[in-house]
């Protein structure tokens, strides 16, 4: 019979120096270059796009930017004067973890990088992406962006619409045991962290608010969100548009039933009875799928968001989520086909106007002004009037087309 000491020596609790693994990283780096980055690579552009989730020029652009951002993404010798991992090598390890959702240890056999170094690469990569590209690809819509979004919304039958809003849950496998109660909701059954996002028709994500415990519902998330900060401060672009002959000054998002009856949300009609209400519900529910499609593309493109999160620190999870959204938007911009237009260009031109805010950035508004703007956003009567005008607008357009 084995003694306790023998069991401990043969098991994982054995004490002693760490075992050194001589990884031929130089050969692995050269193999990676031959496979994907040489003048005549083994794998073509299609294979690269599928495995890196982006085109080769965009990936190399990110590698170059991160190399200038931090010394970590530069080729440096170690204590034995042996060449370390190249910037392409480190970024490849990070993007593979985001793309496939596997553990860092899975990439040791091909890329010859240990688990701890792989996790470190991932954390530095997402942090660098946020700091280098976050200001551009996680920005609030500019005046030009709002004009384009309003034009798209009007062509789709919703004047004043600038996107769709919804929430997504990410399973947190390593959630501390004492927190599981507040991070678990009945319909999910596991600890999750919530992402609130706004997406447009091209699946670009314009707003991302991540970090609320999974036990909350969408209204609780909205109450903590930063979605309407610019409107409350008076710094958002000033918008004017007409629906059914009536003028409105606040753009809106398409949302589903749980969201409150505010003038900035347009919801479907529960159990519609009349033909007009059924037509409106059909159009609203069809256009509202934009944000759900964006979630699906985001999770398919970066499978780490589809699988349970295995990191302990919530800050690391937030960096991964935001970095994936930034990369998602970068890929959309890089692969956008200008000639691809699914709308009827013979439709009437947009009647919306957008002007810059009269409030300068950084201005501290008076509390009375903030409360007044908050009251305007929460106006239920304006919400019902806007929904009624949209019902008449869509029905009138439908009759004109059928006649």
Image: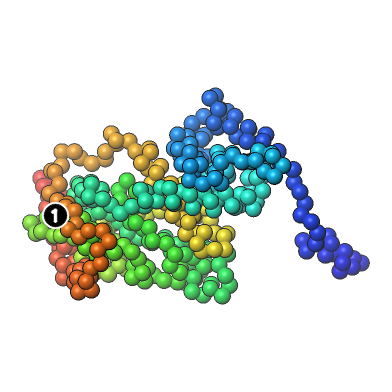
- Could you tell me which quadrant the N terminus lies in? bottom right
| Residue beneath the point at 45% across and 34% down | 57
Name the residue tied to disc 1: 241
Instruction: Give the image location of residue 209, x and y in percent.
Output: 38, 61
Asked if residue 216 is positioned above or below residue 78 in the image, the reply reads below
Horizontal side, residue 334 vs residue 351: left or right = right
Instruction: Give the image location of residue 375, x and y in percent.
Output: 20, 72
Asked if residue 194 is positioned above or below residue 95 in the image, the reply reads below
| Residue beneath the point at 59% across and 52% down | 120
Circle 1 Cα neighbour tier, 10 Å, few/some/many (<14 / 14–19 / ≥20): many
The residue nearer to you, when weighing 28 against 156, is 28
Horizontal side, residue 184 vs residue 284: left or right = right
Instruction: Give the image location of residue 221, x and y in percent.
Output: 37, 68
The answer to whether one can see residue 179 in this image is: yes
| Residue beneath the point at 28% across and 34% down | 339
Q: Dividing the picture into quarters, in which one does residue 243 lie?
A: bottom left
| Residue beneath the point at 87% across and 64% down | 6
| Colour convention | rainbow
The residue nearer to you, when weighing 348 against 225, is 225
- Could you tell me which quadrant the C terminus lies in? top left
Please identify the residue farthest to the right as the structure is shown.
Answer: 1
Instruction: Give the image location of residue 297, x and y in percent.
Output: 42, 48
């Amino acid at each position: 019979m084995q003694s306790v000491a023998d069991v401990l020596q043969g098991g994982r609790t054995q004490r002693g120096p760490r075992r050194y693994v001589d990884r031929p990283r130089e050969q692995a780096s050269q193999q990676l270059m031959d496979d994907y980055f040489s003048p005549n690579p083994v794998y073509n552009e299609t294979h690269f796009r599928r495995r890196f989730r982006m085109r080769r020029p965009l990936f190399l652009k990110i590698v170059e930017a991160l190399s200038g951002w931090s010394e970590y993404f530069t080729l440096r010798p170690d204590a034995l004067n042996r060449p370390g991992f190249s910037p392409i090598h480190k970024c490849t390890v990070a993007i593979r973890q985001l793309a496939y959702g596997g553990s860092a240890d899975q990439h040791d056999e091909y890329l010859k990088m240990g688990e701890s170094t792989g996790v470190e690469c991932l954390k530095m990569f997402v942090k660098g992406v946020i700091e280098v590209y976050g200001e551009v690809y996680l920005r609030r819509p500019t005046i030009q962006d709002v004009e384009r979004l309003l034009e798209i919304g009007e062509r789709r039958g919703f004047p004043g619409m600038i996107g769709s809003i919804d929430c997504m849950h990410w399973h947190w496998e390593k959630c501390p045991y004492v927190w599981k109660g507040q991070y678990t909701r009945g319909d999910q059954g596991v600890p999750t962290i919530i992402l609130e996002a706004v997406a447009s028709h091209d699946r670009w994500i314009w707003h991302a608010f991540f970090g609320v415990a999974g036990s909350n519902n969408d209204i609780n998330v909205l109450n903590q969100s930063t979605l309407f900060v610019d409107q409350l401060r008076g710094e958002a672009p000033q918008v004017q548009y007409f629906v059914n002959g009536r003028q409105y000054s606040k753009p809106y998002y398409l949302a589903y039933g749980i969201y409150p009856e505010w003038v900035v949300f347009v919801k479907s009609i529960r159990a519609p009875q009349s033909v007009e209400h059924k037509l409106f519900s059909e159009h609203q529910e069809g256009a509202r799928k934009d944000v759900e499609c964006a979630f699906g593309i985001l999770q398919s493109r970066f499978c780490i968001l589809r699988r349970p999160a295995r990191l302990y620190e919530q800050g690391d999870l937030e960096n991964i989520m935001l970095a994936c959204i930034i990369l998602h938007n970068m890929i959309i911009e890089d692969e956008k086909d200008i000639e691809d237009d699914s709308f009827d260009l013979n439709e009437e031109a947009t009647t919306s106007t957008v002007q810059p805010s009269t409030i300068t950035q950084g201005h501290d508004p008076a509390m009375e002004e903030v409360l007044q703007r908050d009251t305007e956003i929460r106006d239920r009567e304006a919400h019902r009037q806007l929904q009624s005008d949209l019902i008449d607008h869509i029905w009138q357009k439908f009759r004109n087309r059928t006649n």
